[in-house]
Each structure stands twice: as structure tokens, then as C-alpha cells.
Image (tube, rainbow, N blue to C red):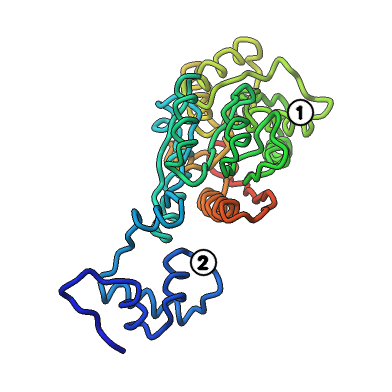
Amino acid sequence: MGSPDTSRKPTIRDVAAVAGVSYGTVSRVINGGHWVSPDARAAVEDAIRATGYTANHAARALATGRANSLAFLLTEPQNLLFSDPTFALLLRGATEALTKRSMTLVLLIADTVDEQANVERYVRAGHVDGVLLVSSHESDRLLASLVAAGIPTVCTGIPLGETAGIPTVSVDEVASARMMTRYLIDEGHRRIALITGPNDTPGGRFRLVGFREEMGDAFDPDLVEQGSYEQATGDAAMTALLQRAPDIDAVFAASDVMAVGAIAALRRAGKRVPEDVAVAGFDDSGLAATHAPPLTTVRQPWAQISATMVDMLLEVIAGTAVPSVVLPTTLVVRETA
């Protein structure tokens, strides 16, 4: 194997010479393509480290018309990025998946109409190759606008409204909520309350459907309060529920963050968890395991969700039709229930 001239910047051809493979093989490895054997890929990666090669992304963008970056789009208030750990988990997973491909992730937050219009202009201008939409509300028009503009887009969760043909990566919200509700019933609880998320989000709507279906004839609409996936709303919802039904013996919150708020309200009311009221959450985002006491919850496969979204979006960008994916959840039993 030869060695590159160290007086100039290494090129793909230098990498190919050191690795003992063709120029095309190196190009496919760098661009995250398929049809490269594990041995060839390892040889190329070793040669890249040995030569100090770095891709000229500006030149590649000019040649291919690609930005070599994807957008991580959050259509929520900015504070939720920091207060809800689920978004941080998805952001980290997507960043790691793109780093392996020498691509960049661009964080975009668009809660208001003006912010969404600004994001739409940015994306339409070609600053990113596609969009990972990690939250959506039924009233938002941004998703429909991106699709109408031909912007490759993949969604976390099944968005509500006109979304036919948009690839999604989701968990079965209904079945997952039924699983947790059945667990609480099997543990002997009968007065089970639900703190649900916003009804214009897939998690808020479908987790309520699952809870109602599993409760059957025992479903009581007075034992349902809506929150917004924030701790304060879990606290307020639990307070309202206790005022209407002080005999509640279990509560299922549609997110771990709201479950933590519910526990705070129960403690103020002199209720012990789990001795007086069992509490269950949803997500297993890290908060559940570290809370005192640790939360019983539904675990979403966050790393798998992020990696699958990135893989699917790159396929869409390449012109491949991809089916939506539903990933499994897991019941995690801890001390609160």
C-alpha cells in the first residue's frame, strides 16, 4: 500500500491507495452507501484515520445539490426542549446516527406561527436535505406545507390530520396504554385516574383511547384530566382529580414528567405513594429511574427510534419509498406502583 504526500491535504484517492480499494468503494463508505463489505469498510475507515482525510462538504454540496445536514424540528415551546428529557434523548440519538455518516444535525424550534413560517423558509431554501419532525399538533400546518413543498420528512409518532403517505416511526400508543392500565387493574386498583396529554397530539389522544378501552365499563370521565407534558400541569391535574375523587387509588400519567408533578400533589395532600395511591408514568426517559421513589412506567426505545428515523429519512432523500415503522414498548415496574 502506498502513502499520501503529507505536504498537501489528503484526498479520496489517497485513502483508496492506503486502503487498497477503489475510489468508488471509498466514496460509498464516506457517503454511507450500501454494497460495501465489512472488510473493505474497515480498511477504508483505518485509511481515513491514517491519512487524516476529511471530506470537503462544501464541494460535495456544490456537486450534489445536497446540504449534507438534516433538521431536527421541534414544534413546541423552547422550554420543553430542556424540561422534557424525551426530546433530549431523541436529539442525542439523531446526532450520534448522523455523526457516523459525517453529517450535521440542525436544531430548529418552531412553536408560534411566525416561527413556523421562518422554519419553512429556511428548509425550502435548501439549508437541510430533510426534516426529522419530533413533535406535531393537529392544528399545525407546517407538516402539510413541508410535504406540499416536496421536503423529505419523517415523523416521530403518527401525526393527526392530513398525513397520508408520510413515513413515521412510532410506538403503539393504544396498546401501550392498555398494557399499563391492565397492570394497575391486575394489581387490585379500581379507582384509576388518567392524566393525559394534549388531545391534539398523538400521545395525548391515543393513550387516552387505550386507557378507556382497557377500563371498559369502569371508565369514568371524571377521573381524566389533561396536562401538557409539563410537571406543573401534572401537579395541577392531580390536585383537580383529588378534589373531585379523593378515593382515587391509582393514577396513570401519560408522561414521566407529569407523573412527577402528580406525586408532588399527592404528597401535599397527605397521600403516600404507593401505599395510598399508586402512580405510573410513560416514557422511561431517565427521570423515572432517578426519581425518589423510582417510577413504574412504559419504556419507549429512544435510541432505536432516533436511529430508525435517520435511516428512513436518508432513504426518502435517496428517492426510496419507505413504510412506517412501529416499535415495541416495555412495561417497567418500579416502586411507585
Q: Earlier in the sequence, mark 2 or mark 1?
A: 2
The x, y position of residue 92, in whole percent, is 42, 47
- The residue carrying mark 2 is 33
Name the residue located 67 percent from the left edge and 53 percent from the top edge.
322
Mark 1 = which residue? 212
Residue 162 shows up from this direction: yes
State which quadrant residue 139 falls in. top right
Instruction: Determine the secondary structure under disc 2.
Output: loop
Q: CA distance from mark 2 to mark 1?
A: 46 Å
Closest to the observer, 59 or 207: 59
Residue 195's tag is: none
Vertical order, 48 against 204 (above or below): below
For the N terminus, the quadrant is bottom left
Residue type beneath disc 2: Gly
| x and y, in percent, of residue 175 in the image | 73, 41
User: Which quadrant of the view contains residue 220?
Assistant: top right
Q: Give the x, y percent position of residue 100.
A: 41, 61
* Quadrant assignment, res 135: top right
For mark 1, give the secondary structure: helix
The residue at the point 77 percent across, 24 percent down is 219
